[in-house]
Amino acid sequence: MWKKREIVVAVTCLVLGSAGQLAQYLVTPLGSEEASAASNVAKAVAHPTAMQSAAWLDLTILFFLPALVVVASLAGARTTPLGWVASVVAIGTTVPGIAYVLAPDVLYVGAIHGDVTARTITAYNNSGVVTAATIVFLIGHVLGMVLLGVALWRVGSVPRWAAVCLAVSPCLEIGSAAVDVRPLGVIAYLLLMAAFGACAAAVARPRTATIPAPATVSART
């Protein structure tokens, strides 16, 4: 049973954690992750307002982590082995992912003012720590979200279409980056919003207590 304050926090994190990522994806002027730093710096300089807005919207990723905790609860993290494993993978690999998401856009904002060069960004992206964090995040993000989707399907705490949306979303997200097709990325984030929205509805749904029927008392006459 969720308390009222917990419901408010959970719904807020689910909404901002998904809608914020879609908004950031739509606003950012940067190209695909495969594009060169010099190309992305040129785009950031050409669209400074959009780049700065995208950097601020990156902060919504901070709501994504507690949102995953809510999803994990609905997926049976405390009661099923699958839910527990899915939660550990999804949440654990999101932690390095937060730094992976936030830092690059901050560097591109710095490039707008001439404080950061394309060479600096390239060196950052090619560093061993960032490479390792990126690999862990990407693999763990896809695997963890797919497992959470399967766990939600099995537990039945949300409609099964929501479980499918959650599982498919990261696959389309990574696929869109690989082939550089932005509409595919938009669809991925819309599916995430739909899945998180269903989770928010499940958390906010009122639970009615079952009142036991009164015992029948037989009287002897």
Image: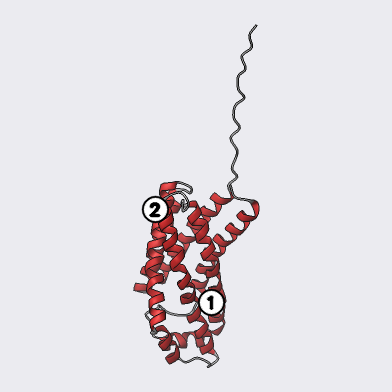
Q: Is residue 182 above or below residue 206?
A: below
Q: Nearer the viewer, mark 2 or mark 1?
A: 2
Indicate the quadrant containing the C terminus: top left, top right, bottom left or bottom right: top right
161 vs 219, nearest the viewer: 219
The residue singled out by tag 2 in the image is: 150
Numbered label attached to residue 54: 1
Residue type at numbered disc 2: Val
| Residue 220: quadrant of the picture | top right
Residue 169 in percent (x, y) is at: 42, 62
Q: Is residue 181 visible?
A: no
Picture colour scheme: secondary structure
- In the displayed image of the protein, which residue is found farthest to the top? 221
Residue 51 in percent (x, y) is at: 53, 81
Which secondary structure lies at badge 2?
A: helix
Is tag 2's residue or tag 1's residue first in the polypeptide sequence? Answer: 1
Which secondary structure lies at badge 1?
A: helix
Residue 126 in percent (x, y) is at: 38, 84
Residue type at numbered disc 1: Ala
Looking at the image, which residue is at 51% across and 89% down?
111
Label 1 CA crowd tier, 10 Å (few <14, some 14–19, many 20+): many
Viewed as shown, does residue 169 lie left or right of 44? left
Give the distance between the C-alpha atoms of the residues marked 2 and 1, in whole angstroms. Answer: 32 Å
Residue 100 in percent (x, y) is at: 46, 76
- In the displayed image of the protein, which residue is found farthest to the front? 220
